[in-house]
Image: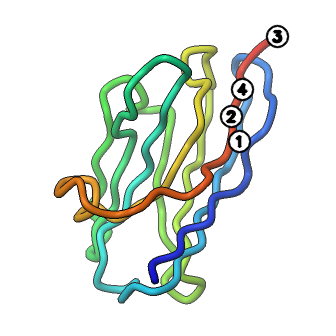
Amino acid sequence: QVQLVESGGGLVQPGGSLRLSCAASGIFFKFTSLGWYRQAPGKQREFVATITATYNTNYTDSVKGRFTISRDNAKNTIYLQMNSLKPEDSAVYYCNTVAAWRSGVGSWGQGTQVTVSS
């Protein structure tokens, strides 16, 4: 029922920027906290950033000051603006509800690949 479609990934040089998008359906979008999560090869999926229904945001320490999460309720979409990208940011990026992440219940989409390399 819940569908989350990520896009915007690609190959970028260190120091470059990308903006990821996540289009959501099957949820009460305006009332839902959502987040970005990432998984690099051989590593566990990790929290990156979240945004609540009241536009409060939270970030993992490694991306603070570089990444910005935002939402457009009219488009049922969240974004992740990524600046000053580093090779260690390379991963598949996924979006999901905060409730799904915290509870461990819910599905994950295909994600979008971000590769930071010179």
Separation of residues labelled 1 and 2 (CA atoms) = 9 Å
Q: Determine the residue located farthest toward the left in the rendered image.
A: 103
Amino acid found under the numbered disc labelled 4: Thr
Report crowding for label 1: few under 14, some 14 to 19, many 20 or more residues within 10 A (C-alpha): some
Q: Find residue 114 and name its label.
A: 2
Separation of residues labelled 3 and 4 (CA atoms) = 10 Å
Which of the two labelled residues, at mark 1 and mark 4, occupies the earlier sequence position? 1
Separation of residues labelled 3 and 2 (CA atoms) = 13 Å
* Foreground residue among 15 and 29: 29
Q: Is there a contact, CB below 8 Å, between mark 1 and mark 4?
A: no
Separation of residues labelled 2 and 4 (CA atoms) = 4 Å
Q: Is there a contact, CB below 8 Å, between mark 2 and mark 4?
A: yes
Residue at horizontal 63 percent and vertical 14 percent from the top:
87
Label 1 vs label 2, nearer the camera = 2
Separation of residues labelled 1 and 4 (CA atoms) = 10 Å
Amino acid found under the numbered disc labelled 3: Ser
Q: Find residue 118 and name its label.
A: 3
